[in-house]
Amino acid sequence: MTLLCWLLVRGRERALVTARALSDELARRQNVQKALEESEERWKFALEGAGDGVWDWHVADNKVYASSRWKEMLGYGQDELGDSLQEWEAHIHPEDLAQCYDGIRRHLEGETPIYVSEHRMRCKHGGYRWFLDRGMIIGRDENGKPLRVIGTHSDITERKAAERKLAENEARLRAVLETAVDAVIVIDAYGRIALFNPAAERIFGYHADEVLGCNVNLLMPEPYRSAHDGYLRRFMETGDARIIGIGREVVGRRKDGSQFPLDLAVGEMTVNGQRQFTGILRDISERKQAEALLKESESKLRLVMDNIAEVFWMADVDSEKTFYVSPGYERVWRHSCQELYDNPHSFFDAVHPDDRERVQANLATEKTGQPFECEFRIVWPDGTVRWIRDRGFPVPADSGPVKQYVGLAEDITELKRREQLEDELRIADAVAAERGQAEEKLRQQKERYQLLLNSIGKGIFGLDVQGRCTFCNPAGLTLLGYRHEADLVGKDIHCLIHHTLADGTPCDKERCEVRQALLTDEIIHGADDVFWRADGSSFFAEYWSYPQYENGEAIGAVVTFSDVTLHKEAEQSRLLAAKVFESSSEAILVTDSRNVIVSVNPAFTDITGYSAAEAIGQTPRILKSGRHDEAFYREMWSTLLKNGHWEGEIWDRRKNGEIYPSGPTSTPSRSPAGSPTSWRFFPTLPSARPARSISSGWPITTC
């Protein structure tokens, strides 16, 4: 009994101990749960305080509990969204749903430590915004299956827009670099090539893979290659920039070792804290060749214009001013060129009073833009009368009426005298026949005629009705390359001197212009045919064929001719000069001996802003920028007069006051009176572009 009582007491004590232990464990677990809930509240509060929404997914029942901030980011109130997984799925953009579920699956299966997804979600207003979801499993069952996933919800719409804009900018930049005509090369602070676009590959002959990481001096000839690193290092140490932001002409070296001229502009930038330099290069080989050809052509043209016997002139229609006249003017008019420049109408003062009305009518033709030809007389200061043939041609304008004319005036006094003598011979023959003194008169006239034939500088030969030569004067024999008149007399003149046209095609005898006077009874004039010499060579000939009559019947023709080959070449050169002057993309101004501007071309107006009317009569000082002192200009003129040309860099000022760089070339010439004049050429440079240096060099090497 005692034992039974003891056992009952001990059992009761053990039950009380067990009950107290269970009670303590329950209290402990309640405290842990409370602490856990408080901890979750704290981190949820912290995350929402940072602007992120919080979601809590209970995997077993597919319930998603979203924080008020999460719903607010979609534009909803606390009670406007359900807590089912389907509610979340309904707001995901259809195009993003698959990748969201794939991310969740991979995390639930243990492939990723956390779940991360960037996707679009539909907001309450119907539009979509980008969000970044991040979450992780925080609870599993005894079998390791996920029970609970908690995550955050961040609005990344602005970041996505910035990324899209950045991608568009990068694509645009890549397209520009790949399609640019100019080479673009980027180097780092050590001169190593970091970018080499397709245009650079084409210009230098290297593939980008061959040069990336190499020193840029690979593209330079000596001595610039060896000196480059030192110049770049000095710039990095001192910041003394001699090339950056300026641009200049340099010499490049291709992969095959050949050298060629380049225009290069260099800029500096900082990328990710690293200094880099960008060079934009353009191959100017063709431009340099064109400039050399133009300069050579201008020199030849000036040589021709200064030495031709005829007068080449260029005039402005509106102002009626002559802005160029060749030295031949002083020989033909016996007045100085400067006098014509000072007084554009001074040439008209020398016109014979009886011919002034006809000349005035031709001057009016210039207003119509039509070519003209006029013959008139002028009177020299000593009273001598000379005959002039003047021809003018309009210079086509880009738009609107013709603004300029070019022309050629020549002394035709000798031609007029021959025509007069021929008229006198015909009259003398008629008078002698009427008076019965035909034989004696004929003999006298023939002697006079022969004397004239022998003394006249132009060729003259006669034809009978069959086209056979009846005579040829000494000048004609010389021009045709024959020693004796007997070599021509009695022979078909067409077969000897006019059998082939200038283009090499045969000339039909029946259509021969020289013989047309025999067939049409008209005076025939030709200026575009060639005559053939005895040695087989040819020359351009201007000729007049006059029909001859006896007792009213045609008995033949007399043909006068001269070699106009040089005249043809000179005329072509003069026309070319006028065209070059007007159409050149390079600005050109011409000054007289007083340094007064007498002519500018359209390109000058485009570059400086001054019209021809505003510039002519001024001096180049209207372009003076104030950046150069008087010593600079004295040295320039000294070099110009000493060496015959000057090249260099000048900062000028446009009409609007803008200062800009130019790289002009000045070339002096002499007026017939011996006074110096000059032509000045300005390279056509974009106004936003810096001045280029005349000397060659590699820009980066002299940073």
Image (cartoon, grey):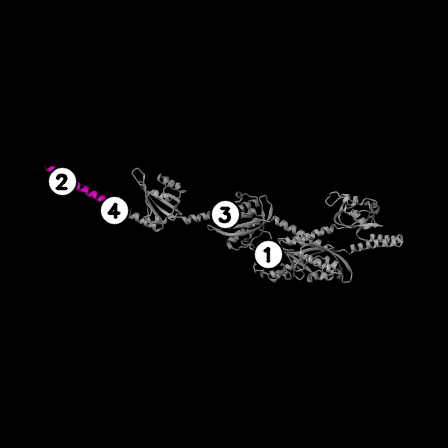
Please give the residue where the numbered disc 3 appears in the rendered image.
172
Q: Earlier in the sequence, mark 2 or mark 1?
A: 2
Please give the residue where the numbered disc 2 appears in the rendered image.
9
Find residue 556 and report its horizontal and vertical position in percent.
82, 48
**Is the residue 677 above or below the residue 106 in the image?**
below
Find residue 386 and report its horizontal and vertical position in percent.
77, 58
Tell me which segment is drawn in magenta: 1-28
Q: Earlier in the sequence, mark 4 or mark 3?
A: 4
Q: Nearer the viewer, mark 2 or mark 1?
A: 1
Q: Distance of mark 4 from mark 3, alpha carbons? A: 62 Å
CB-based contact (under 8 Å), mark 4 and mark 2: no
Q: Which mark is residue 607?
A: 1
Q: What is the three-letter code of the residue carrying label 2? A: Val
Q: Earlier in the sequence, mark 2 or mark 3?
A: 2
- Nearer to us in this view, 539 or 420: 420
In the rendered image, residue 224 lying in the magenta stretch gets the answer no
CB-based contact (under 8 Å), mark 1 and mark 4: no
User: How many other residues sit within 10 Å of disc 1, few (<14), some (14-19) or many (≥20)?
Assistant: many
Q: Earlier in the sequence, mark 1 or mark 4?
A: 4
